[in-house]
Image (spheres, coloured by chain):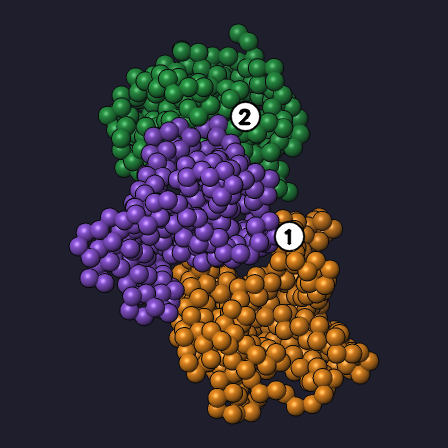
């Protein structure tokens, strides 16, 4: 396996406020990694720093051997990093199809966009049925599918998902997790932020636990789950 | 009969208003910029056509692509290197910036092209279609068709092309657009370029059918604004309907109270702003109401 | 946006010194300097009045110049047609401007942002055309007012003093708005109409009051301007250029300081005089460039720029 994403002593934040204080994290090619922690632990800020919408203030951030510092978010999409942002942020007044076309902006040709859309529809047949509908009319689960499909349109090597299951029914989450596992088997690495621990660790090979802007626990998923500190950290109870 | 002629004239000029307003509308809708220099950009387009016609003897309708391309380039550069710098600032900042830009363009036009009132005569200026007492000059009909076609072309571009969809996406959510690999700075420059290109087309049409000078730009900007408010921000059918509503209102007013046609336009504007701020076909775009 | 020039007594002393200095200045200067300074006071007052509705109220009244034009024509008609004295003309100007603001306010405050800005622009355009077509007001030919009595020197001093007095009134009004109940209501308004209402603020009334004060001041300087130039025509007194100049002064001077707009007005009017003197055929364009430079370099105001540059550590968390 080769190292895809590597963050060392990464610091990030908004304006004067530093939220992520020196995080070491890596993702190997084709690997599923979970990132868990209580609300406000800095997970979203870390994800946005990797995607490029939050400035990095220190440390290094490398993707497939390329230093990401100084590269704008839209350039990182071209390199192979795609983020499904928290709250999904679909283009609300546009149809499912148009959202996917927008997601495929970095593709070279119209044909390449059509092929990518075809693969996305194969993964989420529900979206094909609703391709002409405005995304505002979709259910929560369908919107999340659309957001994932939009991110996949760029053909990423690393897919970042910020809050997969927020507000979704468990059965919908199961479907989404299975779809993600298929995406991973097709060769895309995943870094997934998830509130629901069971869902987060079900498929993930490794997991990071974040607290107050630092990584407090890391390792294989089953080890992390078995660690006595996991419950304490995850529940946010000190000592 | 006079009324019917006024309505027909209004519809004809309304087509021109639609194409003029569409460029203004896309810039406003996508970037939340009220481009007070839009009228001056139209005038520059009119001079491109005028110079080509008088010096090279080209038919005004054939100069349209030249005006469009020249203005696209100007608009792209203005947005990329000037207006993008203040997009994050307040609504005032862009409003005042484009006003300053307008002053510079007006002054430049005055120095380069003089304050003289210009116009073009083509061999078929006098040719007209007559139905009973109704008279429709052919050149005005041609201008109407070009205006409507260019407006529809923009609509097709926004709906059917990848770039058009990227522009719409950026207008809905610039940050989500960045996460989709779209560079908003470039999209904004292209959008302003398209707005300016439409201004260039409108300018070529102004030159083809009427007289102009550097100082009439302000009135054109105001009319573009009125049409957008009437039709609804970002809406192509709205621009066409709004353009015709304004054109007909102005022409009817002019046939009854010749000196109050501007006031009629403003009155229409204020009624719509207050009673129906989304316009006839308004959709949610970017601006707040 | 709160006026923050230290304690009130110190502020009063500073203002008093400046006012006395300006009041005795005409004894030592000629007509040109007085006329230029009178212009600075006029534009400064316009900016302060605009700041009330645009800065405090958050409503970009781009067409606020409509009150300037109304004031000019109110006094014009009162003096030229009805042969009333100047003071009565000023009173008519203030009343008419206030009345219009109160009448259209409830309608216009249903709009926000660009829509409000352009709504006021439309109001200005419509009023300008109505005035142009009003036979009483001289129509497009313009309107001549009676000439003020006196020598050029005494006339210049007279208008210098009148504009200075109005400027002081405008500053007092700004302080009154800032420190009084209206200022509290404005700060609540900026947190949103809902918040303000939950605090017991009558939002519409607050906005209309602000605009009425702004309109009264603007109408007053319009009246004085009309009398000082003795000849007015619609394109001159309903000129958007004046509104824009005032916005630029607001940007440069900042909305948070009392004397900032005055200093900015001084620089802008100075720049105008210089460009008209040295770049006769390019003055419009040069002014446009100044406007562009002001916005590009100080998009949030010159005072904010200075604060961010030099006091970033202290004020960083405030925004």
Q: Chain of mark 2?
A: A
Q: Is residue B8 above or below residue C163?
A: above
Residue A179 as seen in the image, left or right of residue C87? left
Residue B24 seen anywhere in this rendered image of the structure? no
Which one of the lettered chains is coloured orange?
C
> Disc 2 on helix, strand or loop?
helix
Is B257 or C118 nearer to us in this picture? B257
Which one of the lettered chains is coloured green?
A
Relative image position of residue C136 (x, y in whole percent): 43, 83
Name the residue carrying label 1. Answer: C289
Q: Do the residues bearing badges 1 and 2 touch, measured as CB atoms within 8 Å?
A: no
Q: Which mark is residue B25?
A: none
Is A114 or A160 nearer to us in this picture? A114
Query: Which residue appears at 41% of the width and 53% of the height?
Result: B210
Q: Quadrant of residue C112?
A: bottom left
Relative image position of residue B101 (x, y in whole percent): 57, 51
Residue C140 seen anywhere in this rendered image of the structure? yes
Query: Which residue appears at 44% of the width and 73% of the height?
Result: C132
Q: Quadrant of residue A103?
A: top left
Which label lies toward us, 1 or 2? Answer: 1
Query: Which residue appears at 73% of the width and 60% of the height?
Result: C278
Total marks in image: 2
Q: Which mark is residue A75?
A: 2
Give the Cα separation between the discs numbered 1 and 2: 34 Å
Colour representing chain B: purple
Residue B91 as seen in the image, left or right of residue B136? right
For the N terminus of chain C, the quadrant is bottom right
């Amino acid at each position: 396996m080769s190292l895809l994403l590597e963050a060392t002593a990464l610091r990030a934040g908004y304006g004067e406020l530093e939220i992520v204080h020196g995080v070491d994290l890596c993702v190997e090619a084709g690997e599923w990694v979970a990132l868990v922690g209580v609300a406000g632990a800095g997970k979203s800020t870390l994800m946005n720093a990797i995607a490029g919408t939050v400035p990095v203030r220190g440390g290094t951030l490398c993707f497939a051997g390329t230093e990401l510092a100084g590269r704008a978010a839209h350039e990182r999409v071209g390199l192979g990093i795609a983020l499904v942002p928290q709250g999904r942020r679909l283009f609300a007044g546009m149809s499912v199809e148009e959202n996917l076309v927008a997601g495929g902006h970095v593709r070279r040709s119209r044909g390449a966009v059509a092929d990518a859309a075809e693969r996305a529809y194969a993964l989420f047949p529900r979206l094909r049925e609703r391709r002409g509908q405005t995304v505002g009319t979709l259910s929560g689960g369908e919107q999340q599918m659309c957001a994932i499909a939009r991110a996949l349109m760029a053909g990423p090597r690393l897919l970042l998902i910020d809050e997969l299951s927020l507000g979704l029914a468990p059965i919908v989450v199961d479907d989404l997790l299975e779809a993600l596992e298929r995406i991973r088997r097709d060769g895309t690495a995943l870094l997934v932020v998830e509130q629901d621990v069971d869902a987060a660790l079900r498929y993930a090979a490794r997991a990071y636990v974040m607290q107050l802007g630092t990584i407090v626990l890391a390792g294989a998923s089953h080890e992390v789950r078995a660690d006595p500190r996991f419950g304490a950290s995850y529940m946010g109870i000190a000592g | 009969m006079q009324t019917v002629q006024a309505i027909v004239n209004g519809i004809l000029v309304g087509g021109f208003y639609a194409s003029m307003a569409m460029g203004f509308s896309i810039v406003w809708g996508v970037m939340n910029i009220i481009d007070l220099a839009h009228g001056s950009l139209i005038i520059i387009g009119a001079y491109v056509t005028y110079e080509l016609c008088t010096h090279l003897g080209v038919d005004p309708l054939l100069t349209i692509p030249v005006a469009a391309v020249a203005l696209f380039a100007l608009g792209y550069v203005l947005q990329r290197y000037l207006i993008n710098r203040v997009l994050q600032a307040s609504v005032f900042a862009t409003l005042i910036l484009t006003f300053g830009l307008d002053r510079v363009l007006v002054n430049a036009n005055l120095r380069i092209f003089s304050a003289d009132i210009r116009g073009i005569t083509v061999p078929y200026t006098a040719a007209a279609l007559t139905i009973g007492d109704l008279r429709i000059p052919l050149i005005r009909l041609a201008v109407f068709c070009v205006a409507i076609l260019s407006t529809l072309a923009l609509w097709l571009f926004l709906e059917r092309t990848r770039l058009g969809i990227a522009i719409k996406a950026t207008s809905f959510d610039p940050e989500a657009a960045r996460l989709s690999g779209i560079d908003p700075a470039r999209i904004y420059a292209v959008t302003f370029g398209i707005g300016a290109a439409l201004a260039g087309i409108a300018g070529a049409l102004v030159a083809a059918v009427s007289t102009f000078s550097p100082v009439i730009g302000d009135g054109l900007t105001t009319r573009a604004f009125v049409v957008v408010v009437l039709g609804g921000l970002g809406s192509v059918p709205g621009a066409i309907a709004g353009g015709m509503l304004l054109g007909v209102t102005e022409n009817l007013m002019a046939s009854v109270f010749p000196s109050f046609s501007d006031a009629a336009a403003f009155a229409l504007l204020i009624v719509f702003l207050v009673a129906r701020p989304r316009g006839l076909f308004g959709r949610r775009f970017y601006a707040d109401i | 946006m709160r006026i923050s020039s230290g304690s009130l007594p110190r502020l009063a002393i500073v203002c008093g010194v400046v006012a006395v200095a300006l009041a005795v200045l005409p004894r030592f200067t000629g007509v040109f300097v007085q006329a230029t300074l009178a212009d600075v006071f006029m534009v400064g007052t316009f900016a302060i009045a605009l700041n009330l509705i645009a800065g405090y109220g958050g409503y970009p009244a781009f067409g606020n110049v409509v009150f300037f034009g109304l004031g000019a024509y109110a006094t014009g008609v009162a003096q030229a047609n009805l042969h009333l004295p100047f003071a009565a003309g000023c009173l008519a100007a203030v009343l008419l401007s206030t009345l219009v603001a109160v009448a259209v306010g409830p309608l216009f405050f249903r709009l926000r942002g660009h829509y409000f800005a352009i709504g006021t622009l439309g109001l200005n355009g419509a009023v300008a055309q109505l005035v142009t077509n009003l036979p009483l007001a001289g129509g497009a030919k313009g309107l001549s007012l009676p000439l003020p009595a006196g020598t050029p020197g005494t006339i210049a001093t007279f208008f210098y003093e009148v504009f200075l007095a109005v400027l002081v009134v405008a500053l007092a009004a700004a302080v009154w708005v800032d420190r009084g109940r209206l200022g509290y209501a404005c700060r609540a308004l900026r947190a949103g109409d809902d918040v303000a209402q939950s605090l017991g603020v009558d939002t519409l009334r607050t906005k209309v009051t602000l605009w009425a004060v702004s309109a009264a001041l603007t109408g007053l300087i319009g009246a004085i301007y009309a009398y000082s130039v003795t000849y007015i025509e619609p394109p001159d007194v309903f000129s958007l250029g004046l509104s824009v100049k005032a916005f630029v002064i607001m940007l440069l001077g900042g909305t948070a300081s009392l004397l900032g707009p005055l200093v900015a007005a001084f620089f802008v009017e100075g720049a105008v005089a210089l460009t008209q003197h040295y770049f006769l055929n390019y003055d419009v364009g040069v002014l446009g460039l100044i406007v562009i430079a002001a916005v590009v370099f100080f998009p949030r105001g010159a005072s904010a720029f200075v604060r961010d540059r030099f006091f970033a550590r202290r004020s960083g968390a405030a925004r």
